[in-house]
Image (cartoon, coloured by chain):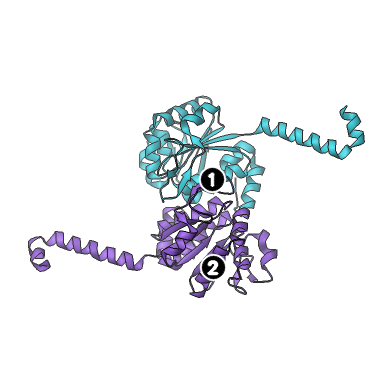
Chain colours: A purple, B cyan
Amino acid sequence: MLSVLRKSFPNVITQANRVVRCKSNQDKCAKNALIILAPGAEEMEFTISADVLRRGKINVTVAGLHGCEPVKCSRSVVIVPDTSLEEAVTRGDYDVVVLPGGLAGNKALMNSSAVGEVLRCQESKGGLIAAICAAPTALAKHGIGKGKSITSHPDMKPQLKELYCYIDDKTVVQDGNIITSRGPGTTFDFALKITEQLVGVEVAKQVAKAMLWTYKP
Amino acid sequence: MLSVLRKSFPNVITQANRVVRCKSNQDKCAKNALIILAPGAEEMEFTISADVLRRGKINVTVAGLHGCEPVKCSRSVVIVPDTSLEEAVTRGDYDVVVLPGGLAGNKALMNSSAVGEVLRCQESKGGLIAAICAAPTALAKHGIGKGKSITSHPDMKPQLKELYCYIDDKTVVQDGNIITSRGPGTTFDFALKITEQLVGVEVAKQVAKAMLWTYKP
C-alpha cells in the first residue's frame, strides 16, 4: 500500500515518513531532567537551569517540593511548578536531577526525606545529579557522592571540605555522575555542562551561542 | 526625654535611633523599578533583572502585561506577577521601567498601547528605560529614544539600525536615560548597570561579588 501511494504522491509520503522517523528518533533520544523547586530557592539558578536545558531540547519537569502551588523564591519571584515532586517521581526515570541553591531553598531540600530518596535512587542507577551554590550541602546531608570532587558557594565550603575533595578554582566541577557549581553567576556554565553531558557538546555550544554566552567545555 | 533615656540606656537608645534614621533614609532613598512581564518573555532576562535589582535593595514591581494571572514565558517557566500593569501604573512613579526580551513577549510589548503610554510618560520625565534582547524594537515601535546609541540581540539589528546609532561591540549600552543590552548571556551586566545607575557603583559591585560575577562598570 505504501509503495503504491509513494508512486502516486512521492513527496507527501517521503515527508510523512520523515515525520514518523523523526518522531520515533525524538522519543528514543529525548532526555529527561527533574528540577526540584523548594520555597526560597535562588530563582536565577532555577530559571537559568530550566531555560538552558529546554533550549537543548531536554524535557524538563519542574517539581514543587511541597506540591503544585506557586513557589516563592529567595528574591520574591513566584514560580508555578509543572507538578509536585510526589507526582513527578511516579512518571519514570530522569537522566538528571537538578538542585538549585538559595539558603532557605537548600534548607528545605536538606530536611526532605523525599529528596533524599530521589537522590539515593538516582545515585544507585548511576544517573546524573547536579547541585549549585548552597545545594551541594543537601547532597552531603543525604549522603550522596561522598569523597568525590565537588565545589559550591564559597560560604558552604566549611560544611563540605571534610566530606569531599573540595575544589576552589573551577566554576563547574564534574566527578562521574556528580556536577556541582558555585552561584548565580556560574549557572550558565552549570546548565551548559548538564546539557553537554545529556545531548552533546555541539548542542551545548549552539545553545550558548544563541544566548550570547561563550561556553568553554 | 531622649537625653535622659540615653543616659540610662545608652545602647538601646543609640540602636533605636539608628533604626529610625535608617528607616527614614531607606524611605527617602528607596528606588522603584517596574518590570513589565508579557506572555512569551525570556524568563532568564526577566528573572535575572528582578533578582539583581532586589539584591540592590531596589523595590521591584513585576507587572503582568495582561493582568495578574500567571505568565507563561518563552521556555515554559510560569511566573506569577506581583500585580497587573494597569494597577502598577496607578501606584506612582518608577525610577526605571525594564523590558525583558523574548520574541513573543516583545511582540506583545510592541502591540500594547498601555506599554507605549508608560514608556512615553517615563521618557517625558527623563526616567530610566531599560530594554534587552528583542525589546529595544519595542522602544522603536513606541517612538522612544530615537537617534540615541543602543544595542540589542543581533537578530534585531536590521529593525533598529536606521532609527538609532546601533552599537555592535558592547554588551550593555547607555545613552542618557536609555539602557540596552543583547541577550540572556548579557543580562547580569544589564541588571548591574541599572543597579549602578539607581543606587551606585559600589552597591552594584557588592551585588555582583555575592553572585560570583565580575562586574566591570
Does A104 sit above or below residue B30? below
Q: Quadrant for residue A142, please give it.
A: bottom right
Q: Residue at x 67, y 43 (%)?
A: B202
Question: Split into 4 quadrants, where in the image is the N terminus of chain A?
Answer: bottom left
Q: Amino acid at mark 2?
A: Glu
Does B107 sit above or below residue A191? above
Picture coordinates of residue B169, whole percent (x, y): 47, 47
Circle 1/circle 2 CB separation < 8 Å:
no
Picture coordinates of residue B52, whole percent (x, y): 58, 45
What SS does tag 1 mark?
loop
Does A204 sit above or below residue B136? below
What SS does tag 2 mark?
helix
Q: Residue at x 49, y 44 (%)?
A: B46
Nearer to us in this view, A5 or B29: A5
Using residue B147 as the reference point, say whether residue B28 is left or right of it. right
Q: Crowding at label 1, few (<14), some or many (≥20) Cα neighbours within 10 Å?
A: many
Q: Residue at x 51, y 31 (%)?
A: B88
Q: Amino acid at mark 1?
A: Val
User: What residue did someone put label 1 on?
Assistant: A77
Picture coordinates of residue A67, whole percent (x, y): 50, 54
User: What residue did someone put label 2 on?
Assistant: A117
Q: Residue at x 43, y 58 (%)?
A: A60
The answer for which chain carries disc 2 is A
